[in-house]
Amino acid sequence: MLSPAEIIHKIEVIRERFPLTDKERADFYQAVLTRILDSDADPKRLASAALGVPC
Amino acid sequence: MLDPTEFSRLLGNMLVWVIINNGNPLGCYFLVPFLVSNMKLEDIILRRRAIAQMHKDDQAEATVRLYRDVLEAISHSHEPKILASAALGQRTTLEHVKTALSSLLNGLRDGDIDIKDATIIVNGIIQVLP
């Protein structure tokens, strides 16, 4: 199981691969939403990392 | 107590969600924390329905928009897990409601949410508890 910090790092790495296709981006956001549900990581930080905006 | 307008809105949200859940009253838990969200439960439900009706070529773009809007709401929300489960079309759990309540209390403590909104939410929860 990844730590919250590792999850956020992975999200940032994937986000930096943008532009993705719409399908890829939908899958990425869905994965982030799933992590928000399932992990102990701060949901606001996960969401901000996915969007590339400051928390 | 809730004022009549607020209660009507609460009831409207509850009916929407009960229908969505095929009458499962556990769905009622879902509505309350959404009163403080900038993204309402019914918005998410309606957008998910609309996406399901779209041509397949258009679904991915609309899904990206929905998920992005939900993530933006989550980034400044007191009920992130409930928003996430709504976006994914999942039922919330009592655990998520407890988390939302805990987050609301923290918001109250930190001054991120005012006492009036918190009172409405807590009263709403009492109304829908079995």
Image: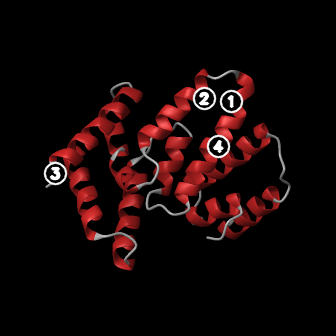
Residue under label 2, please give it: B51
Of label 4 and label 3, which has the lower sequence position?
A: 3
How crowded pointer 4 is (Cα within 10 Å; few <14, some 14-19, many 20+) is rated as: some
Of label 1 and label 3, which has the lower sequence position?
A: 3
Whether B111 is drawn above or below B81: the answer is: below
CA gap, disc 1 to disc 4?
10 Å
Q: Residue at x 73, y 42 (%)?
A: A27
Q: Residue at x 36, y 37 (%)?
A: B27
**Is disc 4 placed on a helix, strand or loop?**
helix
Of label 2 and label 3, which has the lower sequence position?
A: 3
Quadrant where the image shows the N terminus of chain B: bottom left
Q: Looking at the picture, which amino acid does disc 1 mark?
A: Gln
**Is disc 2 placed on a helix, strand or loop?**
helix
Residue under label 3, please give it: B3
Residue under label 4, please give it: B65
CA gap, disc 1 to disc 3?
39 Å
CA gap, disc 4 to disc 3?
34 Å
* Chain under callout 3: B
Side of A42 relative to B126 (left or right): right
Whether B58 is drawn above or below B105: the answer is: above
* Chain under callout 4: B
- Report whether mark 1 lies on the same chain as mark 3: yes
Q: Marks 4 and 1: in contact by CB < 8 Å?
A: no
Q: Marks 2 and 1: in contact by CB < 8 Å?
A: yes
Q: Residue at x 77, y 39 (%)?
A: A22
**Is disc 3 placed on a helix, strand or loop?**
loop
Q: Is residue A48 visible to us here?
A: yes
Write down the quadrant of residue A17 in the picture: bottom right
* Chain under callout 2: B
Q: Residue at x 25, y 65 (%)?
A: B116
How crowded pointer 3 is (Cα within 10 Å; few <14, some 14-19, many 20+) is rated as: few
